[in-house]
Amino acid sequence: MNWEPHEGNKRRCPAHDEVFARTTTCSKCEPGKGAPLGAITPIDTDKDLSLLEGEFREAGKYLRRNGRDLNEEGTAQDKNTAIKFFEAALKYDRAALEIIKARKDREHDRWLVEQNRLLQGNGAA
């Protein structure tokens, strides 16, 4: 049985005319029957987050490179500016790591939902 997409990010079972959340199955269908759930599909923002992570990493590299140049061949004022560059680069690196951590947490949550679904017998193994 193929479940159909339904408005509000839900699914509909045409055999039983039941609307249910994407993270569950039709309550009237046999366990293990029907189409596999689409609950574990990637979130649309993952691509955007990857792009943002790349931008943060590039900005951090750029600032570190400029800070290194100022620190090596500059005056005392340039060395102070280099320290500011390094601090800003560290902030960009931390922001990129936060994005990675958030993505890994979301992937783990998806895995937990999938494992729960498999343990309950609500999908093909």
Image (cartoon, rainbow, N blue to C red):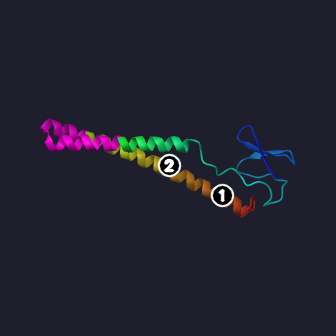
Amino acid type at circle 1 is Glu
Amino acid type at circle 2 is Ala
**Residue 48 at what x, y percent from top left?**
51, 40
**Residue 12 at what x, y percent from top left?**
80, 45
Query: In the image, is residue 30 above or below residue 52?
Result: below
Q: Name the residue that disc number 1 marks.
A: 114
Query: In the image, is residue 115 above or below residue 42?
Result: below
Question: Residue 115 occupies which quadrant of the picture?
Answer: bottom right
**Residue 91 at what x, y percent from top left?**
35, 43
**Residue 116 at what x, y percent from top left?**
67, 60
Q: Identify which residue, 74 or 25, lies in the foreground.
A: 74
Q: Identify which residue, 37 or 47, lies in the foreground.
A: 47
Q: Identify which residue, 32 or 55, lies in the foreground.
A: 55
Q: How far, Cα to Cα, is label 1 from label 2? A: 18 Å
Residue at left 55%, top 41%? 45
Instruction: Please state if 67 lies on the left or on the right of 13 as rendered.
Output: left
Residue 86 in view (yes/no)? no
Residue at left 44%, top 47%? 98
- The residue stretch that appears in magenta: 59-84
Q: Name the residue that disc number 2 marks.
A: 102
The secondary structure type at the circle numbered 1 is helix
The secondary structure type at the circle numbered 2 is helix
Residue at left 51%, top 53%? 104
Residue 62 painted magenta: yes
Quarter of the picture containing the C terminus is bottom right
Query: In the image, is residue 122 above or below residue 50?
Result: below
